[in-house]
Amino acid sequence: MTEMSVLVCFHAHPDDEVFTTGGVMRLAANAGHRVVLVTATDGAKGEAPEGLLAEDEELAYRRRRELEASADVLGADRVVVLPYADSGMAGTGGDSDPDAFANADRAQAAAMLAGILVDEGADVLTVYDPHGGYGHPDHVQVHHVGVMAAALAGTPHVYEATQNRDHVRALTNLMRGATADDVPADRIPDLDSFGLPDSEITTAVDVRGAMDAKRAAMAVHASQIGDFGPFLSLPDDALLAAFGTEWFRRRGGPATEGRETSLPL
């Protein structure tokens, strides 16, 4: 068995861990590496389906339970939720909250995350690309805080979790023809700004072997079924096409020859 490495995945809200790093988390855990999941907020600005929450149950509490269940499915050894409020999407009001992560003092937040990286002896940190994949203020902040924290902690490898814009465009065109009724129009992203173009992707990890765990992790986020429901209903081949590869851009240094197929664990 290879020497254990430590992977830390930094995300904005509970459920974000599944889409872009759920597979690499599960594969890393399967290989005997330590996996740590850090989220910046409690996700309290999410929208739960009517009737889901018990009387007097707060959404933040439910989302924490879902996060822990997802982390267990994905093989995380430790879950940390930083003490910041969820900003919600830009223009929804929460982004003006001084306690929102989007408005946090970056140096202070980075110092907090750096402490976790040092404590864990992190070898690899995942963050988001500079526009947070799709522009969510908390996601953008994850990028800036994560990059700063890695520099403070001396974490050797930083990867920007993203989506391959060109792959998504091709897949979307296919789905519009084959499964247009299955995927609502509001689930189709703005492909001019979503993720990164293929030319900027340095790392494509085949996570099809972890798809059962990834699908199960999606399912435990019942409060966010509006995000996951359209995908959970897809047939296996379509789900594999959409989520069977996880895409990253490696920070620092020239690109290696050819595209990487794994994180350096």
Image: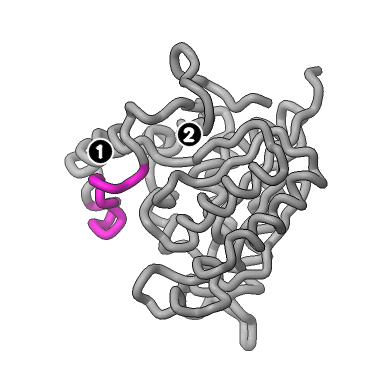
Residue 83 included in the magenta stretch of the image: no
From this view, report whether residue 132 is shown above or below residue 155.
below
Q: Earlier in the sequence, mark 1 or mark 2?
A: 1
Q: Mark 1, residues whose alpha carbon is within 10 Å: few (<14), some, or many (≥20)?
A: some
Q: How is the image coloured?
A: one colour
* Residue 39 at x, y percent in the picture: 62, 57
Q: Which mark is residue 248?
A: 2
* Residue 42 at x, y percent in the picture: 61, 68
Query: Outermost residue, top direction?
Result: 257
Q: Mark 2, residues whose alpha carbon is within 10 Å: few (<14), some, or many (≥20)?
A: many
Query: What residue span does the magenta drawing correspond to?
Result: 181-195
Residue 193 included in the magenta stretch of the image: yes
Q: Tell me the amino acid under the disc marked 1.
A: Arg
Secondary structure type for disc 2: strand
From this view, report whether residue 127 is shown above or below residue 105.
above
Residue sitting at x 59%, y 57%: 220
* Residue 87 at x, y percent in the picture: 48, 71
Q: Which mark is residue 200?
A: none
Tell me the CA gap for discs 1 and 2.
17 Å
Residue identified by numbered label 1? 169
- If the image is split into quadrants, where does the C terminus sit? top right
Q: Main secondary structure of the magenta part?
A: loop
Q: Tell me the amino acid under the disc marked 2.
A: Phe
User: Is residue 22 at all visible to an observer of this figure?
Assistant: yes
193 left or right of 101 in image: left
165 left or right of 1 in image: left
Residue sitting at x 41%, y 63%: 226
Q: Which of the pair 17/8 is nearer the observer?
A: 8
134 left or right of 43 in image: left
- If the image is split into quadrants, where does the N terminus sit? top right
* Residue 60 at x, y percent in the picture: 61, 73
Query: Outermost residue, bottom direction?
Result: 56
